[in-house]
Amino acid sequence: MAHNIELLQGTLDMLILKAVSLGPLHGYGTLLRIRQISNSALEIPQGSLYPALYRLEHKGWIASEWGESENNRKAKYYRLTASGRKQLRTETEQWSRLSDAIASVLKANAEEI
Amino acid sequence: MRARLRSFLAALFQRSSLEQAMDAELQVHIQAYTADLVRSGMSPDEAARRARIEFGGLESIKEECREARGLKWPDEVRQNVRYAFRALRKAPGFTAAAVLSLALGIGVNTAVFSVVEAALIRPLPYADPGHLVAVYENHVTRGEKFEQFANANFLDLRSNSPSFEDLAAHMPAGLDLTTAEGAERIDGAYVTANMFPLLGVRAFLGRALVPDDGELGKPRVILLSFALWRKKFAGDPHIVGRPLAMDGASYQVIGVMPPTFRFPGTHEELWLPLRFDAQDRQQRSNHNLDCIGRLKPGANLRQAQSEASFIARGLQRDYPDDNAGIDFNLVPLRESLTHSVRGALLVLVAAVALLLLVACANVGNLILTRSTVRRRELAVRATLGASRWRLIRQMLTESLCLALLGGITGLVLCFAVTKLLRTSLPPTFMPTGEIRIDAGVLSFGLAAALAAGLLCAFSPAFLVAGADLQSSLAGSSRSATGSGAEVRTRSILVACEVSLTLILLIGAGLLLRSFVRLMDVDPGLSPGHVLAVRFALPRSLYSSHAVRLSFYQRLLARIDAIPGVRSAALITSLPLASEGGSSWFIREGRPTPHPEELIASNRLVSERYFRTLGIPLRAGRWFSSHDGPGAALVAVVNESVARRFWPGESPIGKRFQFYDRPWVEIVGIVGDVRQAGLDADATPEIYRPYAQDDQGWLAPRALAIQTQGEPLALAAAVRREFRALDSGIPIYGLTTMDALLEESVASRRLEVLLVGAFGCLALVLACIGVYGVVAYVVAQRGKEVGIRMALGATPAGVTALMLRQGLAPVLTGLVAGLAAALALSRFLSSQLYLVKATDALTFALVASLMVVTAVAAAYFPARRAARTDPNLALRQD
């Protein structure tokens, strides 16, 4: 677990939105997909996944319905809603502005100032 | 926002499916993870264990999920409510006492509100009632602002005032309806034919009167009330168009009004068109029309009033003989219908509001007692992590639950009280229809319950907020820090209870003293053993003076012959019943200032009237059998006439004349009689023998009979004699003079009874409060008392000590209550009679009553302290 990166506060929601934007997922699937895309760099703590999903659903950004899982079990699938898509876009923009800014600060060296 | 609300509501109302889904979803996750772990080579058991551990606390995750759905506070409320009810069930004595106190307060408040609603809030049952106005003549010189209209004044105002859409008038009419069962007197009214369109009401069957019905020469038509139609015609659906015999003439029924309809300010049961002939239209000296107007949309009362006054000034100029000093007075219809009850109603509202406050203080005290017992429990909860605010919310929930239980119980009481009020209040309290418990009244009850709940919780919650809960867990239940603040809070509550109760009791005391004063008033006659009955002589058959005279003589002879009758007499209208009209007169050889100023009630009586009713002769003589039709015209006046119109001299031997009638000589003076009820001053009255001047419209219509035994025992015999003479004569209103006297004070009696009962209830509650605070102090200081007694304090000394401490808040409350009552009682002035609002005797008596009961309430627990066994007390915990 040492190679995992600590998640920044507030980024979990964004990651979940992104994960489900690629196609409907159940809770465990979300976890796996984030791990897979990040090459196992990002590990979502299992305990905080569900409260986050419920919070996002409560805000209307994702919607859920029951369906069949890969191994023929009933599972609750989440998908992105229209307002969730908008939210994801805003958050992505904000995130890239922030990370650009932070990256440029961190890259700075004495000569450039 | 909408999405959140939807998700919240779904979560709230589909709670069990939410929980199931959550469980299932989390299980799916754990199973999937376990399967993955097994696939990576772990043993199934080990995998399941790992999966569970890594997943984390299932319950706390679920809790977080619920919170994410906004379910935190509804869950807490649910928990609090469940907890509250469990706690209340565990303390049935406390719960019963608190619920009953609150039920009492909420119940009577809701009941009184139902009256307020019917009288002052519910719209009048007419179209656009806000534009309806009652219009009166304002006789400025006599200071009479609410006089009836003369025909011509009404017609002039109607045709000249631009602010009114229309004006209509009505005039009461007693009519004798003849059906197969015989003749019966029905209260009805003549109304100008535009009245019903003006009120905007429609008939239930057939049609209401329309302007065309008011034309002279049109067929005689009549409109029935729903009640009369049901009662007299068995709800005959084909009644419209049928002829009815009334007063010897035939009328055609044109319609029946709906059951909810009631005519403004009256309880009349049938209506006929009022038709003016040419002579009626000129008539300005008889004032007998009640007038209702509808303002045009956009017109306001002030503007209409100034226009009406302008028209009145024109009439004063044009008709100085009749209209000098006559202005018009406009009053919103509702105000005019309710002004007589407003004062009494506000007194009732104030009384029940005070009672509710006392009940709240009392329940606050009870809750406080309990929270002492529960201090440890609260401390444990605080230690386990409940925030102070959470504990306050818990206490709040408990007292709201109590209040809701109280409200529900109070509703039962409310139904009972409302039923009582509905039957005992005069109809003037309900101009908009029945007093009923409707959605408005129920929501008031709910609001009162919630307010009471919050109020009750206030002081205990305050105490929890300020208390040092940790130390009370560490120390004993008698820890000194908590009890000091508590004794203070309790003392404040008791002081409040005492002062509020005192205000209420002083109000009740003032009303009671007024009532006693009123009952002491000499009505001017002896009402005992007098039977009274009213009758109507059909006009067509008894049109001539001679016919009437012979009827009266035969009637008196027959009645006198009934065994048990001492004396019988006839009069135009019965005393004490606010009946009878007045006429103006002039004195011989004196200038007449203005005819309106010489007015006296004009009564025709038979020879033995004064003796029958026990009206004392002050000077001169009574009528005798010689004062017949041919003899010199004579009159007897009352003392008010002598005092007012012949001041400083004897009127005996003086002559006067009524309007255009012949001169009459005064031969006697009799005592004043309170004609309009005990609380109305006596007015000038002139009596004359009916045999000398009977004008048909003013003929005796009432019979008073002095009996040897119970008056009502002769009722059947009296009816029989009437029937034997003429079965076509309707007799009605058979009663006793005692009952009439009683009726004239009935609403005051009811007010005294209600306010007095509320006062007594408040006193009981306040005593419970005082008892509680002393008992508490005794319990708190048990050890101290034990020490004192071990050191030699006497039981009397200990009792006195406890009493002193218990009664300190009573004294504070007493002083505050007296001051407040002194400031507030003047609002009661309009309801008082011959008693000042600051009546020292009442204040002193009520205050002593309060002190005595408080001392009694405090004495029992205080004495218990004195009986403490020092050994036991010192050993207790």
Image (spheres, rainbow, N blue to C red):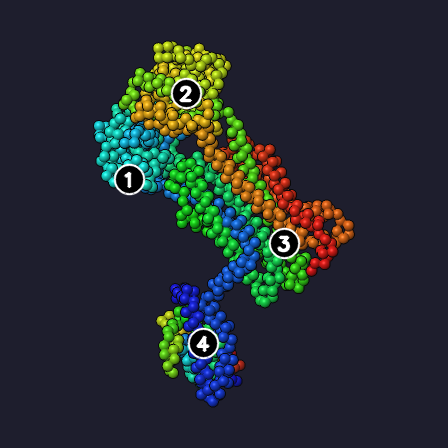
- Check disc 3 and report the residue beneath it: B486
Q: Is residue B273 visible?
A: no
From this viewpoint, is residue B348 visible?
yes
- Which mark is in front, 2 or 1? 2
Report the front residue among B715 and B505: B715
Disc on the earlier residue, 1 or 3? 1
Q: Earlier in the sequence, mark 4 or mark 2?
A: 4
The vertical placement of B14 against A76, above or below, is above
Q: Mark 1 or mark 4: name the one nearer the start of the chain.
A: 4
Q: Amino acid at mark 4?
A: Leu
The type of residue carrying mark 3 is Glu
Q: Which residue is mark 4?
A: B26
What whole-number distance in Å separates the C-alpha atoms at marks 1 and 4? 71 Å
Residue found at the far front of this picture:
B563
* A71, B694: nearer the viewer: B694
- 4 or 2: mark nearer the eye: 2
Nearer-the-camera pick, B522 or A67: B522
* Residue at which label 1 appears: B235
